[in-house]
């Protein structure tokens, strides 16, 4: 299989500007050939005289499975980690006694002395560490696992760490924390998109318990839809994508919810300035083999705004304040159906509601996501594990505006029904084979508009509807050639069908690690990705009016080829240094033409231009996750370019001929995050971010013209130059936090204080233009004669203190 993948890599390199135009039978032959070569390689190297230990690693206090826990036989040089479902499998030579160590970050290590003569199931419960020395040992082992892993361009977020980082309005937000990692620009206030390594906001695959979330934001981008109390694990891939992931170009953000406490009933929550949250979890039966968790959060800004509006109801000069609130609800139920089977049912429901009423019009705007997941785990034997999942996703927004006797409704919607199955086969200690497939049925309602008058004399509607089938199949093999070199080779076949048009894509994946020394390794990766969905309205806008559009006969799928290489160095078992360089080639990138009309359009494709892109950069990071002082420093130097755009319609215009950078291109991006445990009760934290200003497309001048027939009519027209021709001032901000812990008899609690933008930096939220003139005195009245047009800056956050009370029982 490695030879096959290298051949595909060579083919893709010499044909990087062309789309694979192969027939389905040819694609299937290639995929089956790769599968058979991998299986034959595995069978040829199968080990004899070994026994397999397998099982799951869980938290002794809650029963939660632990992801990426380490299982090692140090004296034999053997080891593995649990997969994303907590399952592990390790082959041990029979006929001799061997010590097996089980460890996980923040937990006490457990050792077992085994004498194996046959396969054995061994489920282990680990206790949270209360001994500092043990914690240090486990964290060092975790760093070594990361240094030795073939995974690169990957960030894992610890939810406990998220809760001490100071954030806007005191609300911890796991999605905002990942923007403090290198390669993911932190952005400015009010920016809803996540831009990874020069990719657009639509190029991130965001999944919650394996269901796709299309818009992961609340409050116009200030908060994410993920309630930190309900999140078990978040992992983001910036490159080197495993073969089981597909459908997006730039990143995979995999969020997993907690399973619920199997041991006892418990809860947690918090009360803040604008929102409160509550999470409850516990066992469903006395046998402690079923569990549940339910987690909810809601803002109450609307309660204050309504009170103010009611108090000013009789004042005709009072300005009405819009009503706004959001809520989200996570639920999950888990059943252990036996020793080999588990069933998980989970759902997410979230909504934002914005209302404004006046004497002349009523405006309502709401948007949100709903997801559902049914997942079944089955263990066929000590080496073979399967996960089968059925998911449902629904994202929509609606705008309703009523003006006197006239009203209109505008909205967009995408729904998915997805079925997938994934096999995890720990064939032997040299090979871990993964394979599976998925199929997703998409339903699109695009830019639907209906409007009319109360008397029925005016009535019209517009919009488009599509159905599409997206599918994929994959195989990958992690091959340990020797003690120093490990290779993960994968192949994915993807496809999309819409209205009789079928696209197929072959996506080779390669990642490797070479251990130069016990604490130093070199890594490299290559990944080809195809994306069959396009985001028309950028998520960088203030309002989340996103329109997802499928690939059609004229709109080809997006494609990316990314290569990356780097070094990982573990220093004194405390500090982990990483440096990575990457280059990404992008094809079939979509931009809107000049003067595009995206709403009430029955032929939206006419508003598109298709072109090329590239992104490249260097990322540096150092982190320390043990001891009283913890945190990380990340720096990114990068550039993103778009070029060669051609319009779909001959009547449309895209006047930019030269290469240009998208608005999220950021040359420098720096993040410093630190927390210090002053005492058992008191922890201080700080975050500093710096970045080159985002780009904007601003007019270079203005000209005026006067109508010949209507001599009194004069119009001023802005003169736009090259796209994204102005870079905003540099963005930087310092935030401070303080967590004061209490230890009541019933559990734990704390007061979290935070101050955002400590030195009151007025960063640019947006710009507007207004005339600046000289006042000329003439008689009793002063007349201002405009001399020039000046840009004015609007800032969003001054220095902003906040507090939150958190509790756990």
Image (cartoon, grey):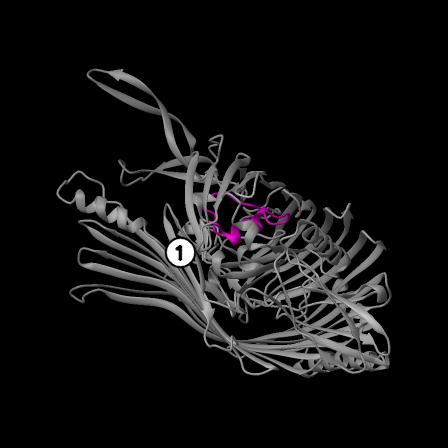
The residue sitting at the front extreme is 745
Q: Is residue 182 magenta?
A: yes
Q: Is residue 663 magenta?
A: no
| Quarter of the figure that contains the C terminus | bottom left
| Quarter of the figure that contains the N terminus | bottom right
Looking at the magenta stretch, what is its main secondary structure? loop
Q: What residue is shown at x 49% (from left), y 30% (from top)?
A: 759
* Residue nearest the viewer, comparing 623 with 648: 623
- The location of residue 189, given as percent across then percent down, is 47, 43
Q: What residue is shown at x 52% (from left), y 43% (from top)?
A: 681
Q: Secondary structure at mark 1?
A: strand
Tell me how many marks there are: 1
Q: Which residues are the magenta region?
A: 172-192
- The location of residue 138, given as percent across then percent down, is 70, 55
* Residue nearest the viewer, comparing 555 with 567: 567
Reading the image, the residue beneath label 1 is 277
């Amino acid at each position: 299989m490695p030879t096959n993948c290298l051949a595909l890599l060579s083919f893709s390199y010499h044909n990087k500007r062309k789309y694979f135009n192969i027939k389905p039978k040819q694609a299937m032959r290639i995929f089956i050939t790769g599968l058979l070569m991998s299986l034959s390689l595995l069978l040829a190297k199968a080990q004899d005289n070994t026994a397999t230990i397998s099982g799951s690693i869980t938290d002794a206090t809650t029963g939660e499975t632990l992801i990426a826990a380490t299982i090692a036989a140090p004296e034999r040089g053997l080891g593995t980690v649990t997969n994303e479902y907590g399952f592990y499998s390790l082959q041990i030579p029979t006929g001799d006694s061997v010590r097996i160590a089980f460890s996980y970050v923040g937990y006490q290590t457990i050792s077992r002395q085994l004498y194996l003569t046959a396969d054995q199931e061994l489920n282990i419960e680990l206790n949270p560490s209360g001994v500092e020395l043990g914690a240090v040992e486990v964290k060092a082992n975790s760093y070594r696992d990361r240094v030795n892993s073939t995974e690169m361009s990957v960030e894992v977020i610890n939810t406990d760490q998220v809760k001490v980082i100071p954030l806007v309005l005191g609300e911890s937000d796991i999605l905002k924390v990942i923007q403090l990692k290198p390669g993911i620009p932190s952005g400015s206030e009010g920016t809803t998109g996540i831009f990874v390594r020069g990719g657009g906001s639509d190029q991130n695959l965001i999944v919650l318990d394996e269901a796709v979330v299309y818009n992961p934001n609340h409050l116009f981008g200030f908060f994410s839809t993920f309630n930190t109390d309900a999140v078990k694990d978040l992992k983001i891939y910036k490159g080197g994508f495993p073969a089981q992931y597909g459908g997006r170009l730039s990143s995979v953000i995999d969020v997993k919810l907690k399973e619920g406490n199997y041991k006892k009933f418990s809860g947690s929550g918090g009360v803040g300035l604008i929102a409160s949250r509550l999470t409850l979890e516990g066992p469903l039966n006395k046998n402690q083999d079923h569990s549940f968790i339910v987690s909810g959060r809601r803002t109450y800004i609307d309660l204050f705004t309504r009170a103010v509006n009611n108090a000013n109801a009789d004042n005709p000069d009072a300005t009405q304040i819009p009503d706004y609130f959001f809520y989200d609800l996570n639920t999950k139920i888990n059943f252990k159906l036996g020793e080999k089977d588990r069933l998980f049912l989970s759902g997410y429901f979230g909504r934002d509601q914005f209302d404004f009423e006046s004497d002349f019009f009523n405006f309502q705007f709401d948007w949100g996501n709903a997801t559902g997941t049914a997942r079944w785990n089955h263990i066929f034997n000590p080496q073979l594990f399967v996960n089968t999942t059925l998911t449902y996703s629904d994202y929509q927004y609606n705008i309703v505006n009523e003006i006197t006797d006239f009203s209109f409704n505008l909205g967009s919607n995408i729904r998915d029904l997805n079925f997938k199955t994934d096999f995890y086969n720990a064939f032997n200690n040299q090979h871990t084979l993964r394979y599976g497939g998925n199929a997703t049925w998409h339903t699109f309602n695009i830019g639907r508009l209906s409007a009319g008058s109360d008397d029925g004399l005016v009535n019209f509607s517009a919009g488009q509807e599509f159905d599409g089938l997206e599918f994929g199949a994959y195989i990958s093999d992690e091959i340990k050639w020797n003690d120093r070199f490990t290779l993960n080779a994968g192949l994915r076949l993807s496809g999309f069908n819409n209205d009789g048009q079928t696209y197929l894509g072959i996506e080779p994946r390669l990642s490797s690690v070479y251990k130069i020394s016990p604490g130093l390794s070199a890594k490299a990766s290559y990944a080809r990705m195809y994306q069959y969905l396009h985001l028309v309205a950028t998520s960088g806008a203030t309002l989340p009016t996103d329109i997802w559009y499928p690939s059609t006969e004229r709109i080809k799928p997006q494609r990316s080829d990314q290569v990356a290489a780097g070094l990982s160095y573990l220093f004194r078992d405390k500090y982990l240094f990483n440096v990575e360089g990457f280059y990404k080639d992008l094809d079939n990138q979509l931009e809107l033409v000049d003067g595009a009309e995206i709403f009430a359009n029955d032929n939206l494709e006419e508003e598109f231009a298709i072109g090329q892109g590239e992104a490249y950069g260097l990322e540096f990071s150092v982190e320390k996750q043990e001891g009283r002082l913890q945190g990380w420093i990340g720096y990114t130097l990068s550039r993103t370019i778009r070029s060669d755009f051609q319009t779909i319609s001959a009547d449309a215009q895209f006047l930019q001929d030269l290469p240009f950078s998208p608005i999220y291109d950021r040359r420098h991006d720096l993040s410093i995050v630190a927390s210090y445990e002053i005492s058992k009760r008191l922890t201080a934290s700080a975050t500093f971010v710096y970045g080159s200003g985002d780009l904007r497309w601003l007019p270079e001048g203005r000209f005026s013209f006067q109508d010949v027939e209507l001599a009194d009519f004069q119009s001023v027209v802005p003169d736009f130059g090259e796209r994204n021709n102005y870079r905003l001032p540099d963005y930087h901000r310092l935030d401070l936090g303080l967590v004061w812990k209490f230890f009541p008899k019933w559990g734990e609690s704390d007061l979290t204080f935070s101050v955002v933008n400590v030195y009151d930096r007025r960063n640019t939220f947006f710009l507007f233009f207004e005339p600046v003139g000289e006042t000329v005195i003439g008689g009793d009245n002063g007349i201002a004669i405009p001399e020039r047009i000046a840009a004015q800056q609007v800032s969003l956050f001054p220095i902003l203190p906040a507090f939150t009370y958190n509790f756990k029982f």
